[in-house]
Amino acid sequence: MPNWGGGKKCGVCQKAVYFAEEVQCEGNSFHKSCFLCMVCKKNLDSTTVAVHGEEIYCKSCYGKKYGPKGYGYGQGAGTLSTDKGESLGIKYEE
């Protein structure tokens, strides 16, 4: 059966993305409703998106998953965060 739909494929749902609903990021196209953080599902835009491979994250979740760990990398003055993001479903990678 031929594909009569036009447009590019969404990077998340793989359905056709038409110009009026398209968001572009790193050469990929997304529906506005699919352009969400892979972890917390927050809506993203060009100022809040962080890309790792084919996955898109908000900057907060990206930092928890791929950011620096250990002493001196706390958030705020003189704090040490031991939160690895388990509450958000992030699996810790060594």
Image (cartoon, rainbow, N blue to C red):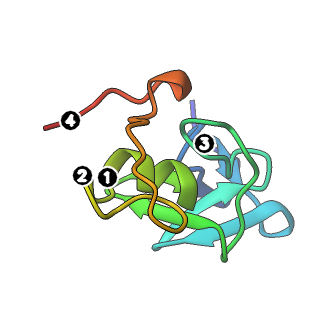
- Residue wearing tag 2: 70
Which mark, residue 93?
Answer: 4
Disc 1 marks which residue?
A: 66
Near mark 4 (Cα within 10 A), the count class, few <14, some 14-19 or many ≥20, is few
The disc placed on residue 3 is 3
Q: Horizontal and vertical percent for residue 91?
A: 33, 26
- CA–CA distance in space, label 1 to label 3: 39 Å
**N-term mark: 2 or 3:** 3
For image coordinates 66% across by 75% down, the residue present is 46
* Number of numbered discs overlaid on the protein picture: 4
Q: Could you tell me which secondary element the residue under label 4 belongs to?
A: loop
Inspect the image, locate mark 1, and give the three-letter code of the amino acid beneath it: Tyr
Residue 1 circle label: none
* Residue plotted at (26% across, 52% down): 69
Q: Quadrant of the C terminus?
A: top left
What residue is rendered at 76% in x and 61% in y? Answer: 18
Q: Indicate which disc, 3 or 4, sits on the residue closer to the N terminus.
A: 3
**Which marked residue is nearer to the observer: mark 3 or mark 4?**
4
Q: Is residue 60 above or below residue 13?
A: below
Lower sequence index among marks 2 and 4: 2
Single out the mark in the foreground, 1 or 3. Answer: 1
**Residue 11 horizontal/vertical position (percent):** 52, 50
SS under mark 3? loop
Residue kind at label 2, given as amino acid type:
Gly
In space, the residues marked 1 and 2 are separated at their CA atoms by: 12 Å
Spatial distance from mark 1 to mark 4, Cα to Cα?
A: 8 Å
Q: Amino acid at mark 3?
A: Asn
How far apart are the two marked residues, 3 and 4, measured between alpha carbons? 40 Å
Q: Nearer the viewer, residue 48 or 84?
A: 84
Looking at the image, is mark 1 or mark 4 earlier in the sequence? Answer: 1
